[in-house]
Image: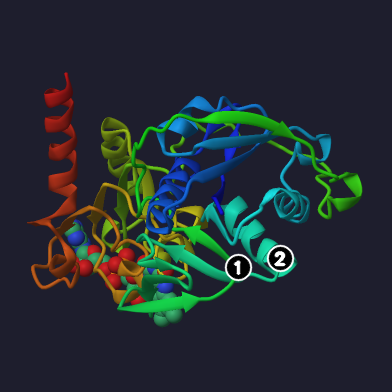
Amino acid sequence: MAIFVYAESHDGKYKKAGLEAVSYAKSTADVAGDTVTAIVFGNTPADELYQYGASKVIKVENAALAKFDANAYAKALTELVQGDIVVLPSTNEGSSIAPVLAYKTGASLITNVEKAPTAVAPFTVARKAFSGKGIETVAASGKVVVTVLQNAFGTKENAVSGSEETSSVSVSDADVKVKVISTELASTDKIDLKEADIVVSAGRGMKGPENWGMIEDLAKVLGAATASSKPVADIGWRPHAEHVGQTGKAIAPNLYIAVGISGAIQHLAGVNGSKTIVVINNDAEAPFFKAADYGIVGDAFEIVPKLTEELKKYKG
Ligand SMILES: Cc1cc2nc3c(=O)[nH]c(=O)nc-3n(C[C@H](O)[C@H](O)[C@H](O)COP(=O)(O)OP(=O)(O)OC[C@H]3O[C@@H](n4cnc5c(N)ncnc54)[C@H](O)[C@@H]3O)c2cc1C
């Protein structure tokens, strides 16, 4: 039986997290000795999914699926999935669909996996526990719905030859439980924090919101998203959407630059999956240095503008 995956796409483009989920499904299929079937809502081209290991792509066009609704999407997936394992990205969409889908199909739910399973029957996989302080190995027999932590497993090209088909589902407006009354788009050219390859993050060491210009300048020159520690968002220096950690967003970029952040365990819980961590802090004893790949002991107000200048020169 194939491994099924929800390939999340928007405006004709796959989300990076959607491609990660397809990569994860391919690794799972390799363990199972099987193939991957990707499900796409809309008409996003299938070719890219073959690149990441999907042998079959099922496209569904249905007016009731035009706007995201967890119940309608889960119902459609329930009709299309013909296997015991369904993989979704841990995006807002994927994380909302997964529990509804698990309930509807009587499946077990395993969230935020980062590594391929070691077995598929029962589905056995190691995942982080206790805010990243430990690893637990879980095994679920029967059907299983799995969400893949964003930026942790990574996108892995694994080209296969694939085929595409269109399918219909019996989902209608009556299945859409949350109706969108109106949408106001705040125009922003900001990079999505959860999708970002590079994140520049800052904490209370910045002393006040008026000093964030240098963090934004550094982020701009690196093409990075900006993030913050929790207290900074709590005081209102930065929007809560930027808060990372145990109670904020969990991210795993290729490069995480932490400026004036002490490195409390609750902060690390959301960022310790980052590939490379650079810490800038004027206290050599700051706990963050223990988790850092590179550390600069010094005043952020001197170092950050210099770093930005050097990067500009390097890029120029
Ligand atoms: C249940 C619970 C959940 C929590 N969840 C989260 C969470 O999700 N995310 C989170 O971030 N926190 C969380 N916290 C809070 C966490 O414990 C820390 O209090 C918080 O992370 C500290 O934020 P900070 O590092 O910005 O500030 P501080 O701890 O005040 O550290 C500021 C750092 O800046 C450095 N600094 C000062 N001046 C300069 C300078 N000029 N140049 C360079 N460095 C300088 C200091 O040496 C210090 O290390 C949680 C706490 C609890 C109890």
| Residue 300 rendering spot, x and y as whole percentages | 18, 52
Q: What type is the residue that disc 2 sits on?
A: Thr
- The reply to whether callout 1 and callout 2 are in contact (CB within 8 Å) is yes
* Disc on res. 308: none
Secondary structure state at the residue bearing disc 2: helix
Residue closer to the observer: 148 or 278: 148
Crowding at dot 2, Cα within 10 Å, few <14 / some 14-19 / many 20+, comes out as some
Which residue is the extreme one toward the top? 316
Determine whether, in the image, residue 288 is placed left or right of residue 247: left
Amino acid type at mark 1: Lys
Quadrant of the image occupied by residue 296: bottom left
Q: Looking at the rendered structure, which numbered label has been put on residue 105?
A: 2
Which secondary structure lies at badge 1? loop
Residue 280: image location, x then y, percent: 16, 56
Q: Earlier in the sequence, mark 1 or mark 2?
A: 2
Q: Which residue is mark 1?
A: 143
Q: Identify the residue shown where x is 61% and y is 57%.
A: 83
Q: Is the CB of mark 1 within 8 Å of ligand 1? A: no
